[in-house]
Image (cartoon, helix red, strand yellow):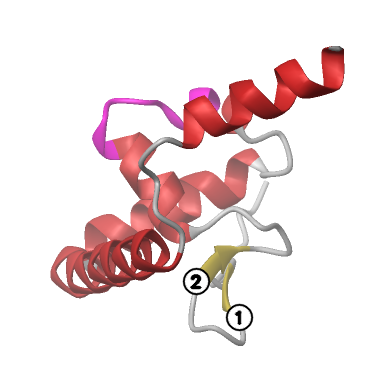
Amino acid sequence: MTLTTATDTVPLETDSDGVIRVGKTRVTFDTVISAFLEGATAEEIIFQYPSLDLADVYSVIAYYLRRRDEAETYRQRRQEQAHRMREENEVRFDPAGVRERLLARRAGKEQ
């Protein structure tokens, strides 16, 4: 039996917002890598995100391990963007008292 060697492409796609997603799913590269860095196995990751393919998760992890510096730069930039977005949303929509307002709204509907 002859084993054919092939070069597979890494199943990563960048969407219109610059977010890297795994394959044709909505699961982000940084979500998969964060789970991996927290100790999850590829099998545990696909259990959490059933739209992912096991081979794709292994491929993404291998990609990360081969390009750790570049991937960490991307992950850091994404974390900074998320932090800025959170701050902007908190300025636009004051989170103080949200729970009380929701409970009051619910109480008004129940009566």
Mark 1 sits on what residue? Answer: 15
Residue 3 as seen in the image, left or right of residue 98: right
Q: Amino acid at mark 2?
A: Ile
Q: Which residues are magenta?
A: 37-45
Mark 2 sits on what residue? Answer: 20
Residue 5 visible to an observer of this rendering: no
Residue at the extreme left: 69
Label 1 packing within 10 angstroms: few (<14), some (14-19), many (20+): few
Label 2 packing within 10 angstroms: few (<14), some (14-19), many (20+): some
User: Residue 79 location, x and y as percent?
Assistant: 26, 62
Is-magenta flag for residue 16? no
1 and 2 marks in contact (CB < 8 Å) = yes
User: Residue 24 location, x and y as percent?
Assistant: 73, 64
Q: Which quarter of the image is occupied by the C terminus? A: top right
Q: CA distance from mark 1 to mark 2?
A: 6 Å
Residue 88 as seen in the image, left or right of residue 109: left
Q: Residue at x 66, y 58 (%)?
A: 26
Residue at the extreme top: 111
Q: Could you say whether the residue bearing mark 1 is in a helix, strand or loop?
A: loop
Q: Could you say whether the residue bearing mark 2 is in a helix, strand or loop?
A: strand
Q: Amino acid at mark 1?
A: Asp
